């Protein structure tokens, strides 16, 4: 299984369109709220942005994780 960069995941999440009527009808059959789940995923992305913003603000410039966190933050804009 290959890994997908977090920046790609966030970019793809931001470009998700509302599900079709068929998708919603099919998901209801299985007790799923597709629209609600998509909205929740986007909300979690915004929550991630808030958390990363705080982390970046308090991360030492020599920390190698800083560049990664900044890359993810750039994808959340």
Image: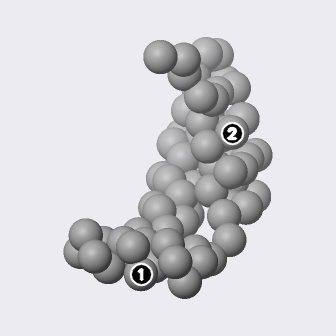
* Vertical comparison of 60 with 19: above or below: above
As helix, strand or loop, the secondary structure at mark 1 comes to: helix
Query: Residue placed at 68% from the left, 71% from the top?
Result: 17
Residue, disc 1 = 25
Residue 2, image x and y in percent?
A: 54, 17
Residue 51 appears left or right of 76: left
Badge 2 crowding class, 10 Å Cα cut-off, few under 14, some 14 to 19, many 20 or more, is few
Query: Residue placed at 66% from the left, 64% from the top?
Result: 16
* Vertical comparison of 29 with 65: above or below: below
Residue 77 appears left or right of 28: right
Closest to the observer: 67 or 19?
19
Residue, disc 2 = 8
Q: CA distance from mark 2 to mark 1?
A: 29 Å
* Vertical comparison of 56 with 20: above or below: above
Q: Is residue 26 visible?
A: yes
Image quadrant occupied by the C terminus: bottom right
């Amino acid at each position: 299984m290959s890994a997908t960069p977090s920046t790609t995941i966030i970019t793809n999440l931001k470009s998700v369109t509302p599900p079709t009527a068929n998708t919603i009808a099919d998901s209801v059959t299985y007790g799923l709220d597709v629209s609600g789940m998509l909205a929740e995923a986007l909300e979690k992305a915004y929550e991630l942005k808030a958390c990363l913003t705080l982390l970046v603000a308090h991360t030492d410039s020599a920390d190698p994780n800083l560049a990664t966190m900044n890359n993810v933050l750039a994808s959340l804009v």
